[in-house]
Image (cartoon, rainbow, N blue to C red):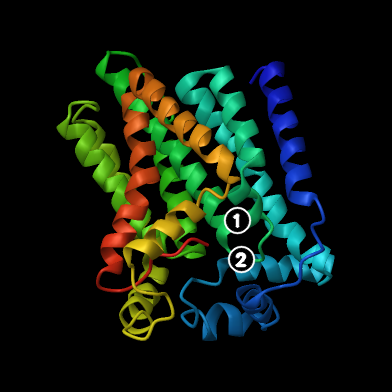
């Protein structure tokens, strides 16, 4: 990494630190954050053994919060500092993703826009597992894009190295995301859909399937302790009287726009910038563009389809 890259990353992280740190200890905890605090106050045996399957999500983030609280205390500023610090680590990951698919200008723009994105700041200050989820999913995206790049290089007759570590990194990061938040199961389906479409359209070579199958097998292997509680909660907790409302058109529309909480007058240029970015990315790296579009559009679509039988559609 060059000095220019490091400088841009430090600048973006400084901007992110300002966005995340502004009045960090001001807001009181709301209900879900109180649940996090409750879990973090349990004994280690209660948290990691007796109550492993108690919550909808595995208590990995609660364990991190417990460790942090033992050192930093439980003041409001100290509590919220952990998710803010974890979220700040996403900035250099996004820079590396941008560098991978579009060069330094795109990487700088992506990192700077991310550091000031409203949802980035909101979830980055929240005492919930979304910070860890977002970091792990960003890492899995970086590993997936690099694996696709290597597959294309091999197709063109160039030698590549490090595929084994990339597969391991992808599987571990996606599994850790699953331990952090159950929505990762939907993201895993989207990764599988990406592979199928990319192979079917001829964007990626067929040999990429071997790498994918190894990665998928490792992901399932790493995720076994979380799979049984996940299905138990999905079939038992998410029932007819679940607290998430039915996905009416109006509710889905409001929730979808809530994922982009920009001021009203800025929404059109933000959406246009996204579409323009997708178009430019498709021309440069179609395999990466396909993956980003699937995550961006496919995630809400797939959650909506699931919500037709079990309401889950909600912006957090």
- Label for residue 128? 2
Residue at 45% x, 24% y: name it.
101
Residue linked to disc 1: 131
- Residue 12 at what x, y percent from top left? 70, 32
- Label for residue 206? none
Say if 81 sits above or below 94 in the image.
Answer: below
- Left or right: 233 with respect to 7? left
Residue at 48% x, 61% y: name it.
315
Residue at 48% x, 50% y: name it.
173
- Residue 84 at what x, y percent from top left? 71, 53
Say if 287 sits above or below 79 in the image.
Answer: above
Residue at 53% x, 23% y: name it.
99
Number of numbered tags placed on the structure image: 2
Q: Nearer the viewer, residue 89 or 32?
A: 32
* Whether residue 52 can be seen here: yes
CB-based contact (under 8 Å), mark 2 and mark 1: yes
- Residue 264 at what x, y percent from top left? 56, 45
């Amino acid at each position: 990494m060059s000095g220019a890259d490091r400088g841009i990353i430090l600048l973006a992280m400084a901007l992110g630190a300002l966005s995340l740190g502004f009045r960090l200890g001001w807001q009181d905890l709301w209900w879900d954050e109180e649940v996090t605090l409750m879990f973090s106050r349990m004994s280690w045996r209660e948290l990691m053994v007796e109550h492993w399957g108690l919550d909808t999500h595995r208590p990995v983030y609660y364990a991190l919060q417990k460790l942090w609280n033992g050192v930093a205390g439980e003041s409001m500023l100290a509590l919220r500092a952990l998710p803010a610090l974890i979220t700040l680590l996403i900035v250099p990951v996004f820079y590396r993703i941008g560098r991978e698919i579009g060069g330094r200008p795109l990487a700088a723009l992506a990192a700077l826009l991310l550091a000031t994105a409203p949802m980035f700041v909101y979830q980055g200050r929240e005492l919930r597992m979304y910070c860890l989820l977002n970091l792990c999913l960003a890492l899995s995206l970086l590993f997936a894009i690099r694996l696709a790049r290597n597959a294309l290089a091999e197709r063109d007759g160039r030698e590549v190295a490090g595929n084994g570590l990339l597969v391991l990194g992808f599987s571990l990061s996606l599994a850790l995301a699953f331990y952090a938040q159950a929505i990762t199961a939907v993201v895993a389906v989207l990764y599988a859909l990406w592979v199928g479409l990319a192979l079917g359209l001829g964007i990626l070579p067929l040999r990429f399937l071997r790498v994918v199958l190894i990665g998928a097998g490792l992901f399932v292997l790493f995720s076994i302790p979380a799979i049984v509680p996940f299905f138990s909660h999905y079939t038992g907790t998410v029932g007819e009287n679940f607290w998430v409302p039915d996905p009416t058109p109006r509710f889905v529309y409001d929730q979808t726009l809530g994922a982009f909480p920009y001021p009203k007058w800025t929404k059109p240029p933000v959406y246009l910038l996204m579409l323009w970015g997708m178009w430019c990315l498709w021309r440069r790296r179609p395999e990466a563009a396909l993956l980003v579009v699937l995550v961006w559009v496919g995630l809400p679509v797939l959650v909506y389809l699931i919500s037709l039988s079990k309401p889950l559609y909600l912006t957090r």
